Amino acid sequence: MNFDFTEEQTMIKDSVSRFVRDEYDFDTRRSIIESDDGISRKFWTMFAELGWLSVPFAEEYGGFGGSVEDIAAVMEELGKGIVVEPYASTVVVFGGLLSASDNSALKEEVIPTVIDGSCMGSFACVEAQSRYELSDVATTAVAADGGYTINGEKTVVANGGTANKFVVSARTSGGQFDRDGVSLFLVDASTAGVDVKSYKMMDGLSAATVTFKDVVVTESQLLNAAGEGMALIDQVMPQILMALSAEALGIMATLNTLTVEYTKVRQQFDTPISSFQALQHRMVDTFMACEQTKSMLYRGLCQAGEDDPEALSKSVHALKATVARYGRLVGEEAIQIHGGIGMTDELNVGHYVKRLMMINVSFGDGDFHQKKFNQLAYSA
């Protein structure tokens, strides 16, 4: 089996890698986080000009027509720079839902604006009581006058403060915990009744609490048939989890490299601490953690091209659980081997670790995905 990147994937990967190396150093990232928007619109425009925003979209909308492997290649390199611009939330999540929707008119209208960088989108799906179960939806969309009126509140909406469009999950029928009856609507952030309260998360990225009060939408803003939103979410979720895991892999690999380099210059007893066998063993453990995570990611990517949704679901649940387990190992070892300096805000190590921690709780933590994997593995 060939795990080498194609020529096109290598070009994209190298392009992102050069950007991170030449344009996105740690001090630049910190200054972006401290800005009002918390992102660089200059860099976002650059992403569009370089074609990165077009990667997963079909050619008929002006996209690259790429696969989940192409997305993973981009996300891994963005992870190495812990890039704060909303590639995952806008292109992978928001864009993925749009691409998979049945609403051709919406796709023709919105996808080109994502590709050219004028649209930043986010998926408003999490509620205070829902934890990781996206079918636990208390937000309602009541049919009225040929459309719907949305009421409810969404929390931890990634990039909610700078997003100008949201895909919103709302219940059009059924009980709060029913999978059936959840609908997905495209809502403009400027719509009357939409209130956005933005804040910073622990990793420096922005999120928001978005409240919908008597927000009027039309049937044309539905992504697919009313009440069938969970089917669309289930279809796109493997791509989302693999993209986040690829970002985590890039972070883990960078942490491992930074830690090895530090042990070569840190002196103790007049010798580099890299010569200590106990530390060598620990660094081998973190290297193997990265390799095992990569293997799990590649397994999922290979199965994404096969027509076996259950096998793919098992693989991505196992992948996300692996990222949680080994991400914590690599992060903790990086901080411990760096010593006290590893805890400081001035060193980049802690920032990588905090992003890993946030990836762990995005769309389900390790325990959640381990449970989902067990249910699938032992249900047969």
Image (cartoon, grey):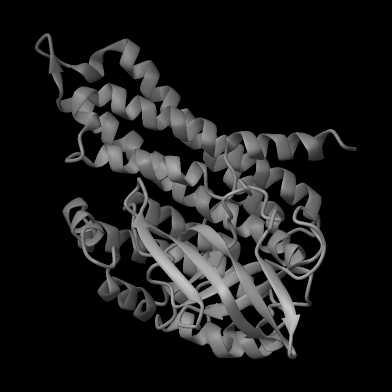
Q: Compared with residue 360, is residue 60 higher up or lower down, i.e. above or below?
A: below
In the depicted view, which residue is nearer to us: 365 or 99?
365
- Viewport quadrant of the C terminus: top right
Looking at the image, which is closer to me, 202 or 309? Answer: 202
Left or right position of 164 against 179: left
Residue visible at 76% across and 34% down in the picture: 374
Residue 224 percent coordinates (x, y): 74, 77
- Residue at 30% across, 66% down: 39
User: 57 or 223, which lies in front?
Assistant: 223
Q: Is residue 352 visible?
A: yes
In the rendered view, does 163 fall on the left or right side of 181?
left
Picture layout, residue 164 above or below residue 314: below
> Which image quadrant for residue 167?
bottom right
| x and y percentages locating residue 371 in the rendered image | 71, 35
Image point 53% across, 56% down: which residue? 243
Residue 263: image quadrant is top left
Residue 191: x, y in percent?
Answer: 50, 83
Q: Is residue 323 above or below residue 205?
A: above
Decide which of 357, 161 is in the foreground and name it. Answer: 161
The spot of residue 40 in percent (x, y) is 27, 69
Residue, far top: 269
- Would you say 181 lies left or right of 72 here? right
